[in-house]
Image (cartoon, rainbow, N blue to C red):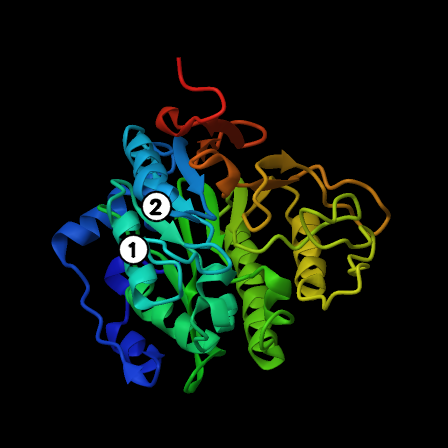
Amino acid sequence: MMKAAQWNSQRWQMTRKVAGLATTILLVAASTAFAASRFGGDDDRDDDERRSYAIGLWGDLPYSDVQALTGVPNLIADMNRHDLAFTAHDGDLKAGNATVGSVTPTTCSDALHLQGLNYFNSLKAPAIFTPGDNDWTDCDRPSNGGFSSLERLDNERALFFSTPFSLGQHHLFQQVQLTPTCLGVSGNVPCVENRRWRVGRVTYATLNIQGSCNNLCDTLPDPAEYAARNAADIAWMQETFAEAKEHHSVAVMLISQGDPGFDATDGTRGPLRNPKTLAETDGQPDGFQTFLLALRDEVVAFEKPVAYVHGDSHYFRIDKPFLNSLGQRLENFTRVETFGDNQGNGTNDVNWIKVLVDSHSREVFSYQQQIVPGNRVAVPAP
């Protein structure tokens, strides 16, 4: 992985084009470079110093006015009270359909993306974001404004991913997938939303993987966009494991939006699939099997702990649903689904997960639910 000082800004400017416009990158000098080193970056010298730290995970928020105006600000204030190496939002900045009469943005307008940017930049720790289907693939629904999905993804790439640094009040330097293998309105573009970084002896990466069949169903599915992005995601995931091995990482964490489904146990929460072949069995277009097969190979070969973080199905859980082709459970794999919207209870479920990372512990990751006191509804805080 490159250090911040090695970043080739000319290559970035030549390859980084969104919506047909060249993006000019301004790299913040001394203070940003310091922040990149302070919050992880790519410097092995702090491996021992960073053997134990915490991160915050959240996503699928906000979905309503009360969540946007009360729930999420409460959550961010709660996160800011903790010492976190970084935070990560696993996508979906709004509900799947716009809400009539809402005072906060609920269509896929620029205002929605700007609201998200303001949230992320109000976090003290470096803030990571990966896009969600409600942010772009579902934006072609008439209820969401009938936008071009690719144009909305281009807009997110320009707004959230215009530099090799995270969002937030402190910045973390990241590797960026610069190969122009994804699609935008103007044709092939770099998949700049796919990021990779290390903190201590753990390797992290984001992957643009979506719900709604990963853009193969719903309104105006786009098989060409899916095929390009899926190939890019698989390549980025495989390179992540290769780098983790090269740097002797003790664990890998992958962060995406879509719930791919891992077995045939709960069709209300994700696609149903044969856990041995990983083929989808519910008759829907399968936008995940090839990725899951490649992921399974990497998890088996890596042998060390792997955490897969996603949102999408709005059900907090930590489990081990991944099997090998013989039907044996992969002991080193853990699925982590973040809290998501529950509009029926207002701000309920506007909570986050604190992950304690200890590179000297056997399982590396341990998880704490963080139920935000100001967002409790059914059972108010004492």
Identify the residue position indicated by label 1 in the image: 115
Element under label 1?
helix
Q: Residue at x 29, y 53 (%)?
A: 167
Q: Residue furthest top?
A: 382
Asked whether 120 or 347 is in front, the reply is 347
Q: Where does the image place residue 244, in percent across and percent down from the top left? A: 52, 51
Front: mark 2 or 1: 2
Corner quadrant of residue 280: bottom right
Q: Where does the image place residue 359, in percent across and percent down from the top left? A: 48, 33
Residue 164 visible at all: no
Q: Where does the image place residue 273, in percent across and percent down from the top left? A: 78, 55
Q: Which mark is residue 68?
A: 2
Horizontal relation, residue 345 to residue 305: left or right: left
Asked whether 286 or 103 is in front, the reply is 103
Q: Residue furthest right?
A: 326
Q: Residue furthest front?
A: 101
Q: Where does the image place residue 83, in percent across and percent down from the top left? A: 30, 30
Q: How crowded is the residue under tag 2: few (<14 C-alpha within 10 Å), some, or many (20+)? A: many
Element under label 2?
helix
Gap between marks 2 and 1, in whole Å? 9 Å
- 44 in relation to 14, above or below: above
Residue type at mark 1: give it: Gln
Q: Residue at x 74, y 65 (%)?
A: 284
- 76 in relation to 120, above or below: above
* Residues tagged 2 and 1 counted as in contact (Cβ below 8 A): yes
Residue type at mark 2: give it: Ala
Q: How crowded is the residue under tag 1: few (<14 C-alpha within 10 Å), some, or many (20+)? A: some
Asked whether 367 or 268 is in front, the reply is 268
The quarter in which the C terminus is drawn is top left
